[in-house]
Image (cartoon, helix red, strand yellow):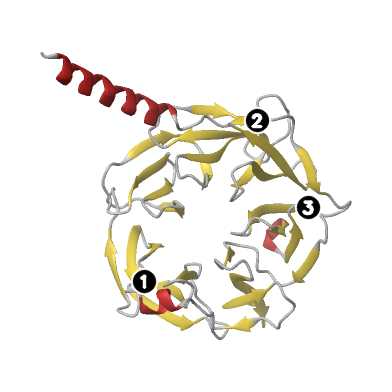
Amino acid sequence: MNSSISSIITTLLLVISLSITAIAQPATNGDPQKLISVEGSDFMNPVWSPDGTQIAFTSSRQQGLWIADADGSNMEQITDESAGYGFSWSSDSESILTRVSEFQNKRRKLAVKIYHTNGNEPEQLTEFRDQMPTIPKWANYDRQVVLISDNDIESFDSGKEVSTQQKASVTKPFYVLKSNQIAKGKVPENSTENISPFDDAQYLNLEVSPDGKKLAFEVYGGNLFVMNIDGTNLMDLGKANRAKWSPDSQYLVAMVAEDDGHNYTKSDLYALSIDGEERINLTSSTDIIAMNPDWSPQGDQVAFDSPGDGSIYILNISY
């Protein structure tokens, strides 16, 4: 082998090595700090706004929705309805989409609503109905809201303004859970494609990576998995629940909990690399029962709740 070829190979190996090591490993920076705590209230499921300026959360039994600034100030309840299950922010951080429920003549009814953080009145997109097996999803750059029912897709105009570039764009796929399926959907075609890796599995907590290239999901009674959006390159990440993506799409933060059949006795948060090689306990230094994590858009904090005291906590992250 001549010297020029040897030099090229050495340079390529160095570049590959640097690219691998360039992905910094997340680590905790200090103990968890209480962000939201109100005596007599149990808060849960904190979710960062996409711009990182606010956190939305609900209370036990998903009753009500609140928002607060990222530092815990300016806490405000935006509804007292049962609206806290599976809610999601719009990409402009100005609205929250959710499925609400109420009892009418002792029967539970469900509807789709959009709540706004600027004080505007909420928008109800559907009438209250007896059955709504899935939660609504933003679609097509938030221009539409979609709702899956068996093999049917209902699509609603969200009223959201989008950029000229997005208006001119081809439709953007969305990803949803159907009955025993992970599905790739499109509007206005209102069609779905089954991309499930397993037959007859029950899938939970589907999350799309920020770069749009990966899907994370759980299998009921099984593990946490990651795969490409076309269903290839399936990776088993082991036992973990309620995973959320890091902003660089290289890690997931998830809870690993234990219970006695009645109550949670322990729960730690782990940062899991998408290649399955790293499993970093972020809460090993505390006895807080840490659950339902969400990684901040800036990547420097993880918000979570604790059923022990009903508080929302912040864990600072360094690299």
What residue is disc 3 on? 42
Residue 108 is at least partly visible in this image: no
- Residue pictured at 73% horizontal, 33% vertical: 288
Q: Residue at x 68, y 69 (%)?
A: 82
Q: In the image, which is nearer the foreground, mark 3 or mark 1?
A: 3
Q: Work out whether 257 lies above or below 242.
A: above
**Quadrant of res 140:** bottom left
Is disc 2 placed on a helix, strand or loop? Answer: strand
Residue 244 located left or right of residue 41: left
In the figure, is residue 13 to the left or right of 243? Answer: left
As drawn, which residue projects farthest toward the left?
A: 1
Q: Are marks 1 and 2 in contact (CB under 8 Å)?
A: no
Q: For the residue marked with disc 2, what is the amino acid?
A: Thr
The image position of residue 143, as x and y in percent, is: 47, 78
Residue 129 point in image, percent of width and height: 54, 81
| Residue identified by numbered label 2 | 28
